[in-house]
Amino acid sequence: MTGIFRNMIRDHKSKIVLVLSLPVFYLLGRLQGSISPYYYQIIIYIGINIILASSLNLINGFAGQFSLGHAGFMAIGAYTSALITSSIGIAGGLPTPLVFLPALAGGGAAASICGLLVGIPTLRLKGDYLAITTLGMGEIIRVIIQNLDFLGGARGFTGIARMTDFFWVYSIAALLIYLLYNLLHSTYGTGYLAVRDDEIAAESSGISATGIKVSAFIIGAFFAGIAGGLYAHFVTYINPSQFGFLRSFEIVVMVVIGGMGNITGVIFSAVILTILPEALRAAAMYRMVIYALLLVIIMITRPGGLFAFGAGLPRRVAQNAPAR
Amino acid sequence: MAAVSDLDLELERGCLVGMIGPNGAGKTTVFNLITGVYKPTAGTIEFEGRSLRGLKTPQIARLGISRTFQNIRLFKSLTVYRTLQAAIHYQAGYGLFGATIQGPKFLRCEKQIDNVIIEALEFFGLRDIMDEHALSLPYGMQRRVELVRAMICRPRLVLLDEPAAGMNQSEKNQLMNLIRRAREFYRCGILLIEHDMSVVMGICERIAVLDYGIKIAEGSPREIQNNPAVLEAYLGERIEN
């Protein structure tokens, strides 16, 4: 009898963890009032960055594509969800979850459509060329938003309802981690790693590299869009300059430092790299210098990422370098 | 100058055919044409009644043609076990949704896949090292892993590109044995490129000889061994009979 029970737990381990985490997050969320707004803000940003970094991890780390435009997807999600809540909000009176969930989903969907549009033409590009194309895409999105008056243009979009809280951010983060973990531990997920490691060999084994890459972009963009929605409904004011290349770059750094394709590593790295700039505030004008120096030191000493311990996963960044 | 300009080759089900010829004769090009890596400028390529022209490599692989590579292309970061998982990926039986939700169908498919992989590992003598990084294995083992990867999806035709390269004689004997047994067990046809004559003559039922992209001879091992055109191509001089 216990044998069956134990097997059930083993087979559904990740599901159980996910389901148990939800009430925990809900309860933790109720404690919001007992900590200072400053720390609360950092905790929210950590969660949003976990979502951003993990969704990019799917594209860069699992599928081996080099995307430098993740902030563009975030921007689409932020603005789309803000539009939705503003419009529905006018109808008024609906409970928050009924408004927020479709808004986030809408933002994610809009971002993933963009991910599809980016993914398809860039399929043949590798390495540097793909990086530059995605970088360009991110900038194009930002500039388009800047020139759309009904989105507020450069002045920004104000008056967004504050709907984001601890529970929303961390349950979505948990869901994403759950999806990635399951994907990585499945035969289907191995297809991603194969495409990353040797696309020609993967195709000769019947794996559609095209399908893998496009799906990575779609899912990655979807969650980046949701992160954008969560962000917009926390800071209540967004403008295009918040979603520029620098933002994309920050997310890429989190993935590289955490270890490409390393799920837990990227989570830890998102936490550390969100806290670090804040913790360095005491250093005033030397803040960014120290931050940059730390990054350089980490890349020299542990190029595979700070947390590169996983078996079957890349040990050195050089092994993941996009094929040229 | 064409890489391959005059090749007429027919393979029956379950055959074991070898392709030989001097370096640069166009043998690997033939493989690349069959698997859709190169597009032919003229001529037809048909497999089981279907034209392969215009099909992409994964599509051709899924029709039942797999291959190994001259310079071994294993997946850099994967263990032997995961390498075989990758080869079965397209036959997983569930999709992205199933992989993330991991319901009962997923569990059933994964168990089945595990059985298939273990069976293949045991057949090829790789069970003990299944959790080793494929690239950390000795060269001969790596070639064997590539061989299993090509066979595990039960293809109808396997293209082997110089499977014996870099092996010593005893490894070659083991390889010949393995290829014979694998062909029987997996019931597939094999087309192999090889420079080592002991291997070619040892296992091939039929041999085609290429030189400068043209088929200059085809026949049983004995016929090829005595064919003056073949000898000339290899030695570059006329043989007086």
Image (cartoon, coloured by chain):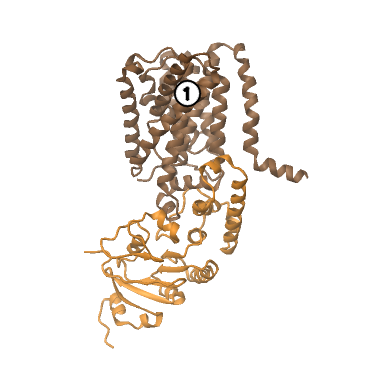
Chain colours: A brown, B orange
The quadrant of the image that shows the C terminus of chain B is bottom left
Vertical arrangement, residue A28 with respect to residue A128, above or below: above
Q: Secondary structure at mark 1?
A: helix
The quadrant of the image that shows the N terminus of chain B is bottom left
Image point (31%, 57%), residue name: B38
Type of amino acid under label 1: Ala
Count of labels in the image: 1
Name the spot of residue A214 as percent of width and height, x first.
41, 41
Residue B166 visible to an observer of this rendering: no
Q: Quadrant of residue A169?
A: top right
The residue that mark 1 highlights is A103
Q: Nearer the viewer, residue A313 or B187?
A: B187
Image point (38%, 70%), residue name: B195
Tell me the subunit letter for badge 1: A
Q: Is residue B2 left or right of residue A88?
A: left
Name the spot of residue A248 as percent of width and height, x first.
40, 28
Q: Is residue A181 left or right of residue A12?
A: left
> How dense is the environment of label 1, judged by Cα within 10 Å: few (below 14), some, or many (20 and up)?
many
Image point (50%, 51%), residue name: B89
| Most distant residue in the front direction | A91
Q: Nearer the viewer, residue B108 or A206?
A: B108
